Amino acid sequence: MFTLDIKNKKTTKNLIICGALSLFLAVFAYVYEMFSYGQYSVHMRLMFIFPLIAGVFLLFKNSLNKYFLNTALAVFANGFLVKGIIEISGRTSSFDHLYLITGCLLLFAAFVFKRKRIEDSE
């Protein structure tokens, strides 16, 4: 069962970081597209979604491994950045699929290697 955990100061700090990172990526994509001579990429525009997903996962107490989860979301965001840059430049690449595969493997690892809960001895 999921419960909200926004009273914790660490969680609040992490939510602020996720929000600031999402805002930075959205502004970065906007500025990059301003200087790309009218070209745009859907991947570049949706790059800010991944820090928001991390913030949503932070809101709920869950037993996912946060290191693997955050790494997977960072790999997805980097993959979208690379894919967006490649699309805007008008080229193609076979390496952008590696980001998707690596991110999926890390996301799978976040679900498999769950965080151990420390039980109270009382």
Image (tube, rainbow, N blue to C red):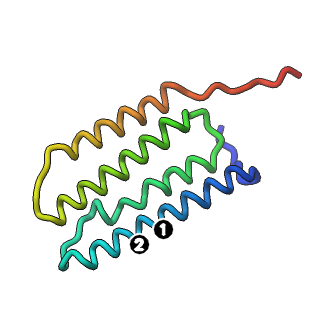
Residue at 28% of width from left, 59% of height from top? 43
Residue projecting furthest to the top: 121
- The answer to which image quadrant residue 41 occupies is bottom left
Locate residue 84 relative to residue 66 in the image: left or right.
left
Q: Quadrant of the C terminus?
A: top right
Q: What percent of the width, then of the height, locates residue 65?
A: 55, 33
Residue hosting label 2: 27
Q: Is residue 88 above or below residue 9?
A: below
Q: Dot 1: what SS?
A: helix
Query: Which x, y percent locates residue 8?
Result: 75, 50
Q: Amino acid at mark 2?
A: Val
Where residue 114 appears, x then y in whole percent? 56, 27
Residue under the image location 55 percent in, 62 percent down:
19
Residue 39 percent location from the top left of the image: 19, 73
Looking at the image, which is closer to me, 75 or 45? 75
Q: Residues within 10 Å of mark 1 (few under 14, many from 20)?
A: some
Residue under the image location 38 percent in, 69 percent down: 28
Circle 2/circle 1 CB separation < 8 Å: yes
- How packed mark 2 is, by other alpha carbons closer than 10 Å (few <14, some 14-19, many 20 or more), is some
Residue sitting farthest toward the left: 91
Q: Is residue 23 left or right of residue 35?
A: right
Which residue does the numbered mark 1 point to in the structure image? 23
Q: Please identify the quadrant where the N terminus is shown.
A: top right
At label 1, which amino acid type do we have?
Leu
